[in-house]
Amino acid sequence: MRPPEYRFSTEDSRGWPLHIKEEVTIADIDQLSTLPVTDERAKAFWETARGWLSDVSYYDRVQRISSPKEILRCRLPVADVKRMQDHNLCRKLRPGEVPMGTVDLFPVAEPSKIPPRRRRIGHTVTINRALDKSSLQKLSQPSRRQQLRQALDGEFCISLDFSAYFDAFEVQENIQMFYCFRVGEDVFCLTRLPMGQRQSVEVAQGATNVLLSFDHLGATSQSCIDNVRFVGKS
């Protein structure tokens, strides 16, 4: 059976609500680092990945913007930015704060959702330009075929996903200066690690690896960022 086809115009999607979870628990990155783990590789992976949230030296490779004119204009309506402010997902720069990088913030329509909605995407232009895929950490995991075989061999399978996962990763204020955008004459910055940042997947997967590094009492865990599956035989 073919999936249904969704036809909509740009004008249609402008009236769809921007998807923002009302309540998001901020990840305590220090607490994550103190959790007991059964896999030391998972802990080492996380300790390296968490630097994108808290260590400004990770951004030394990023070329700073040299002029306020380089700050990209937000492609979300002002009302959407106000909602993001109300949920502490962005803030206006304070006097004396200097923008270091810019982000292209824009909406993507999700017509297959019920009701249809828009999702915000933040593409970190200056950061992604300086970082290539080779700079990403790699952690050996079973292939998709191996994971499917594990699921088929099990007697039970439980799947879940973490709600609003990327909004849970708050970046420190000095690092927020790399995630700036313009709304009218004002300059704002994101306060959470955007999905469009190349290393955001590394951070999210690193946190998941630590959360799943415990004795599963005979079950096997599988994960892809915020999607988790437990497979077991009893």
Image: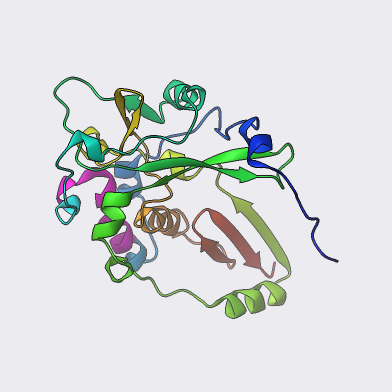
* Residue situated in front as seen by the camera: 149 or 77: 77
Q: Point out the residue furthest to the right here.
A: 1
**Residue 133 is one of the magenta-drawn residues:** no
Q: Quadrant of the N terminus?
A: bottom right
* Residue situated in front as seen by the camera: 11 or 217: 11
**x%, y% of residue 20?**
55, 33
**x%, y% of residue 93?**
25, 25
* Residues drawn in magenta: 43-57
**x%, y% of residue 232?**
65, 67
Q: Residue at x 14, y 50 (%)?
A: 57
Q: Quadrant of the C terminus?
A: bottom right
In the depicted structure, whether residue 173 falls above or below residue 1: above
Q: Is residue 210 left or right of residue 176?
A: right
Q: Main secondary structure of the magenta part?
A: helix
Image quarter for residue 66?
top left
In the depicted structure, whether residue 186 falls above or below residue 229: above
Q: Residue at x 43, y 49 (%)?
A: 195
Q: Residue at x 34, y 48 (%)?
A: 124
